[in-house]
Every structure is written in C-alpha cells, then in structure tokens.
Amino acid sequence: MIETRLTKLLNIRFPILQGGMAWVSSSRLVAAVSNAGGLGVLGSGSMDLDHLRQEIHAIKAQTDKPFGVNIMLLMPNAAEIVDICLKERVAVVTTGAGNPGPYVKACKEAGTKVIPVVSSVALAKRLERSGVDALVAEGTESGGHIGDITTMVLIPQIVDAVSIPVIAAGGIADARGLVAAFALGAEGIQMGTRFILSRECHAHPNYKKVVAQAKDRDTVATGYSTGHPVRVIMNKLAKQYIEAEKKGATPEQLDEMGRGALRRAVVEGNTDDGTVMAGQVCGLIDTEEPVANIFARFEHDLPAIFARLRGLFSEAKTGPAAAENRN
C-alpha cells in the first residue's frame, strides 16, 4: 500500500481514517477498521465516562492495532475524556468543536497523537502552532457538523499553509477520492458516511437503508442560523427544522428540536423524526459490506487508477504539441 508521512506517523498500512461519528462509531467498527489496516476512531460524543472506558477495553480485546478516540471539546466532560484516553494509552485523539491546545503537551508526554478537524486555513495555522501532529481538513460535503468550504478548494489551501500532514475529508468514498486527495496535496483521507454501510457498523437497519437509498441531492445543510451547520439527509424532521429556521426560530428552539434526534435515528431507527447525518457521497454507496471488503476494493482499484493517469500523462507528452516541439 502507499506509504505517506501519515502512515508512518500513525503506524497504519492504509492512509485511511474512519470518522469518529457519535452513536455510530462503536468498538466493533473501530476494531474492524484498525484490523483492516486503517485507523478506527471511536465516537465519544454519545458516551458517558464509564461507557467510554468499556468501549476502549472492547476495542483492545478485538485488535492490537492503533486506534483513536474522537473528542468534541465543547462537551462539559472533555477534560475527563482526554484523561481517560491518556490513561488507556489511546494512540490518537481526533478533536472537533474547540481548541485542543490545552491538551497537546499532556498528549505528547503520553505518546498520544493529536489530530484536530478543521474547516478553514486560519484555524489550521493556529492549531499547527499549538503543536498538533496532523490535521483533518474537512469540506462541506461531509455529513454531520460542517464548514462552508468545499473539499476541492479547502485541501490545497491548507496544504500550502501548514507543514504537518493533512488528511482530506468530505465527499470521499473510494479509491478515486483517495487519489484526488493525493493530487490536492493531502497525505491521507478520512471517511465517515462510507463506513455507515459496513457490516460492522451497529447503526439501526433503518438508518443504513436511508443512507443506501439516498442520492446525490438528498442531503441538506441545516442550522446555519445557529452558527453550527449540520449536513443531514432530508426527511420529515429536517423539513420541519428548515421551516422553523425560515420563520426565525431562536437557537434555543432549534436546539430543542434537535435534542436526542441523532440517537432516535441511529439507535431506535426512527428516520422520520430523527436526524440522519450523512455526506454527499451517498450517491456513490448503496451496499452494506464488511470493512475488510471496503479496504480490499481500495487495494484492488488503486493500480488501475494510477495506470490510467500514467497513460494520460504519456499521451500528453507524445501528443501533437510534443511532436511539434520535437520538430
């Protein structure tokens, strides 16, 4: 497989991270991704501290490979979650919704890598100065909490602005996306939505069915008025939420509408009155399969993609312009 600074940094075979999705990324999925050669990431956003410890122990029972934990830093118990990760010698923490700077020193002393998710150049530069090890640059095509810049233009700008490895996220579901990310200067990718349709993902079958059936235009970004937009698949709740935004609902009223909605969809299977977070790659994936098959397809498809690119460049060198130059 391809070796980059990211694979060396994290001691993984594939430069692929699994997004740490709250209520979705549990121990079985995380272990499966790490065993397949990527970096599985546990979503701690839905867990109390005891549940987090149990899930970390469950991952360790299923794999001896590196794995990570995603931490939403605005959570009131974020410091306690970091402390558990360090005591449990978790290899990587990925972070969102806050500045991991206050935790970087302790993480480095414990040997834990810190990889924040960013959606702007300014934030990427600020977090690099704080000493983080790499960055996930996430475009607005992603599911869940998003920024407003597309992956295509965000990645090269962040790559040009920092010296640490950049991981591309948003709109990536297959080997073509990985190669595109490399072309933009990234050294790996993070996928979330793709892993929802993995056999090891414990999301309710109703949730998976909605993701599998969704097409390219079936997602919508909600919550711009709150300052924290979220990409979801359009359903009854999303329509009600958008209508409430248009009518001037307060952030508090909107927050109440969304309270517990992700759990209703992922755990209970209520995909009408729950939030179905997913990215715009839905149109690229429609089949549930084991994590190992997802990685095997990457390994199978990459040589053909690179061969095609070599052929295109060869044609460019030997085309009419090149022949004219030789004359």
Image: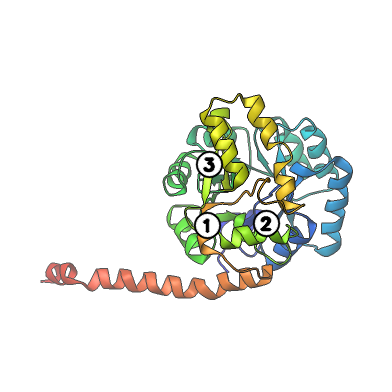
In depth, the one of 274 and 192 nearer the eye is 274
Percent x, y for residue 195? Answer: 65, 60
Q: Residues within 10 Å of mark 3 (few under 14, many from 20)?
A: many
Quarter of the figure with residue 206: bottom right
- Residue 124, compared with residue 285, is above or below; it is above
Relative depth, front residue between 51 and 215 = 215
The numbered mark at residue 281 is: 1
Q: Quadrant of the C terminus?
A: bottom left
Q: Is residue 176 left or right of residue 292?
A: left
The residue where tag 3 is placed is 221
Q: Is residue 104 left or right of residue 57?
A: left
Query: Is any atom of residue 136 visible in this view?
Result: yes
Q: CA distance from mark 1 to mark 3?
A: 14 Å
Q: Please state which of residues 12 and 177 is positioned toward the viewer in this rendering.
A: 177
Q: Earlier in the sequence, mark 1 or mark 3?
A: 3
Question: In this rendering, which labeled residue sits more in front, label 1 or label 3?
Answer: 3
Q: Which residue is mark 2?
A: 207
Q: Quadrant of residue 102 in the image?
A: top right
Establish if 107 lies above or below 270: above
